[in-house]
Image: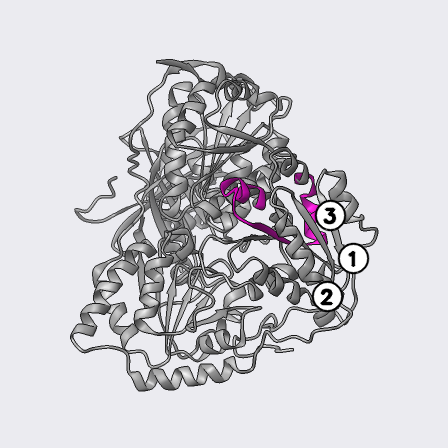
Amino acid sequence: MELSGSEIVVECLKREAVEYVFGYPGGAVLPLYDAFNLQDTVKHILVRHEQGATHAADGYARATGRPGVVLVTSGPGVTNAVTGIATAYMDSIPMVILTGQVPTSVIGSDAFQEVDSVGITRPCVKHNFLVKDVADLAATIKKAFYIATSGRPGPVVVDIPKDVLIARSEFRYPDRVDMRSYRPVDKGHPGQIRKAVELILSARRPMIYSGGGVVLDNAAEPFTRVCRMLGYPVTNTLMGLGGYPATDRQFVGMLGMHGTYEANMAMHHCDVLIAIGARFDDRVTGNIEKFCPYAKIVHVDIDPASISKTVRVDIPIVGSVRNVMAQMVGLIEEARAAGRGPDAQALGEWWQQIEEWRATQCLAYKRDPELIKPQYVIEQLYEATGGDAYITSDVGQHQMWAAQYYKFDQPNRWINSGGLGTMGFGLPAAIGTQLAFPKETVACVTGEASFIMCIQELSTALQYGLPIKIVLLNNRYMGMVRQWQEFFYQKRYAMSYMEALPDFVRLAEAFGHVGRRIERPGDVRGALDEALAMKDRLVLLDFVTDQTENVYPMIPAGAGQNEMILV
Amino acid sequence: MRHIVSILLENESGALSRVAGLFSARAYNIQSLTVAPTEDSSLSRMTIVTSGSDEVIEQILKQLNKLIDVVKVVLLTDGDHIERELMLVKTAARGALREEVTRLCGIFRGHVLDVTENTYTIEVTGSGAKLDAFLRALGTDNILEVVRTGVSGVGRGDTALRP
């Protein structure tokens, strides 16, 4: 069957069972938009800015585990998308970004809306392609989906010149991809896993530290099973929240710069560290010289380059977390049957020590009768939603409070930009999430500075009737910047005060939504309940919060995990 | 430590920029880089001379392996290997100097490729150190132009870097 390039693209997306494409039209992709218009299997979501398209597709991918798909035009369409592509790249999110390009005959001539898309995106994609011949189009799109979703996932850009979209070719969609240069490892090495299990069972002060890899690999279930079999303390990174149930006794909270005291102290004092799908990020390790000084380290990761990148490990295991966990379950059962297992007395003493650290209640904060504490809003959101909502966030203090006070019991519920730290992520990510789960509660926890960065997407939410709940913690400061200036720049608040803020209630109304301003602690819960009851409306809750509240506890830059500032 | 990395990669447009971009993005050092297609026109062979601690070299190999276009990577300096570089030198050659340059060329097993009244153009092949020595022997005052290919290398013995 001979099809045009545009028809081929649409046909490929159907074969990949793509539900939604997030995009914005323009000259170079007009033929493709025309082809979209002639079918309704693949739905196109019109955003208001290409950055919004990438974050929305990203949110969809994080919530569903399926690849997010983006379509933008050449030139500024691509450059606007770059922030979102880099965001997905840093957090290993599977996405396929289709970008329009000027016709092949004028590539390199500085044509209207021409940029070197492959060159510009190269450092922030897993891979990218420029399709010069329509005959290669279907196979290239197949490869793009395969590369984006296999191994360590990531965004893949497919740049398609306008003439390729118009040219015709026989359509054949390959069943499978075989690339001699790309064969990701799947199963872990059995010998390494055996060695690791022996070390894990010999631990006297063990610690399990898991990251986004558990969530991305859909491995929360086997991972949780391994943790429960062992009875060891578990901490999650910011990206790993929900990988292990936060309300479980074995969970000691998030670790790292704004992690709990007990998680960081247990990291510092452990004798065996079991790192699963985590990458020893600098926000986790603190001062690398002081990191886990007593520990032998086991590290399971799909990406060999993540292993021993910043911290040398003793037993590396390259493989999918899901498979390695399944392999470990068998070995632990075997050891148990043979009467071998963790030293119960040592483990008991270790837990006693951890409970002492936990008793400091590092997340306790002083309530105020007059001022709304941001932590209180998150606690109330947690209760009002029964801990069952999809929470997206932007970047800054509100992000840390959401991570600390919303207890995620399930994976894929916590959607935030961890690696790149992209302000403006929260609202479009909520759009992608709500489209994926129209009946579920999706709340975007944000700050007034972040929210303004992609505020135009309120219009998209109206167009598609998405009843997102926006929990705006409005402290009239770029809170995290202000906090660092207070601590480390002698309270010189350079450019962190948000003067001339809009009236957010009227702004929400101007976009066709519902807005509420909440100024007293006593009104917090009522406002949340009212918003959640409005099942078919987007509601923006503008919580006027304590301006000077800081995120605690904190590991200051250059300090070790045992050197936290408590309050 | 100086190291030589050999890479077999898909002969695709942009493959070179992926490798070069990786080195610049991660602040790895490149002393020289050579690349050309192999007997199989779908593959290119690249040789990179770099330097760094053992940890950095390990990361370089892992990051190169991660590039989708890279088929195989090997650290030549891990074992016995042969390295060669080709150099073209245009040197002044007048009067007594003509005799001296010809003699040096013989000692270094070079070939004179082009002769004018005032200059010789000489081809020399060998290790980087040998080429350096030849340039020192010529003396900077006499050298008009130097073109070096950068190192190409291959492992000794029966094993071969194949896809």
Q: Amino acid at mark 3?
A: Gly
Cα distance between the residues tagged 2 and 1: 32 Å
Return the mark for residue A302.
none
Q: Secondary structure at mark 1?
A: loop
Query: Viewer-proximal residue, B127 or A293?
Result: A293
Task: Identify the residue position indicated by label 1 in the image.
Answer: A495
Q: Amino acid at mark 1?
A: Met
Residue A472 in the image, given as x and y percentages of width and height: 69, 54
Magenta region = A430-457
Quarter assignment of residue A457: top right
Q: Can the viewer see residue A177 in this picture? A: yes
* Residue under label 2: A522
**SS of the residue at dot 3?**
strand
Whether discs 2 and 1 lie on one chain: the answer is: yes
State the image coordinates of residue A86 (x, y, percent, origin top left): 54, 45
- Disc 3 target residue: A515
- Please say if the residues under marks 3 and 2 sit with CB atoms less than 8 Å apart: no
Task: Kindly identify the residue that appears in the image at 41 percent across and 73 percent down.
Answer: A250
Residue A485: x and y in percent read: 73, 66
Identify the image quadrant of the C terminus of chain B.
Answer: top left
